[in-house]
Amino acid sequence: MAKMYLMSIKPKFAYQIFSGSKKYELRRWRGIGIEEGSTIVVYASGRVQAIIGEFKVARVLMGEPRRLWREITKEHDAGVDEDDWPYISGSKRAMALRVAEPRLYTRPVSLHEMRRIIPGWNPPLSFKELRQGDPTLELVIKTARTWRQGR
């Protein structure tokens, strides 16, 4: 069964993913990989501070940052630019997640709302796996997926 992760992404990059212009999310690799077919729930950090949507991981590339950068930037629609490079440039290894099926939630779930539902809740610095029984998944994500326009 595919896994699910909650990932903090800067708003600029998060909204590029949901507009369809950014096709890869780049991460420093810290020994924890993400598998193809996984779902990434996006927490837009910065001024947004909200869970805003999700996407599927169609492909995972891992390796030395310069090699990885060359590989993904040769794709004409990669949607990455010089603003993405500094995030992975200082790491020994990096990971590129190919975005598929981006889905913006009908309504974002703000940090304030998250903390009302789950006192003391904090978003991950990078990403964390959401397992069955995790309150973030059970109380928030499953509900956000069912909201419809006009409710």
Image (cartoon, rainbow, N blue to C red):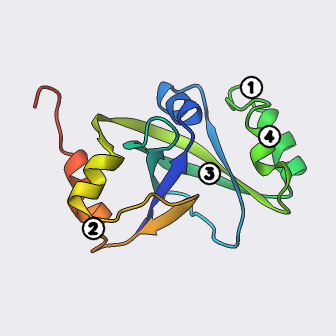
**Visible residue check, residue 128:** yes
Q: Quadrant of residue 54?
A: top left
Mark earlier in primary sequence (1, 2): 1
Residue at the disc numbered 1: 76
Q: CA distance from mark 4 to mark 3?
A: 19 Å
101 and 119: which one is in front? 119
- Residue 59: image location, x then y, percent: 62, 51
Of discs 4 and 3, which sits in the foreground?
4
Q: CA distance from mark 2 to mark 4?
A: 34 Å
Task: Report helix, strand or loop for mark 1.
Answer: loop
- Residue 74: image location, x then y, percent: 82, 33
- Residue 110: image location, x then y, percent: 32, 43
Mark earlier in primary sequence (2, 4): 4
Task: Report helix, strand or loop for mark 2.
Answer: helix
Determine whether 6 is above or below 82 in the image: below
Which residue is pictured at 49% across the width and 25% down the height?
19
CB under 8 Å between callouts 1 and 2?
Answer: no
Judged left or right of residue 12, residue 107 is left
Residue 59: numbered disc: 3
Residue 135: numbered disc: 2
Amino acid of disc 4? Trp
Assign the N terminus to one quadrant of the image. bottom left
Determine whether 66 is above or below 48 in the image: below
CB under 8 Å between callouts 1 and 3?
Answer: no
Residue 85: numbered disc: 4
Judged left or right of residue 17, residue 89 is right
Check disc 1: other Cα within 10 Å, few if <14, some if 14-19, many if 20+: few
Mark earlier in primary sequence (1, 3): 3
Residue 149: numbered disc: none
Q: CA distance from mark 4 to mark 1?
A: 17 Å
Task: Report helix, strand or loop for mark 4.
Answer: helix
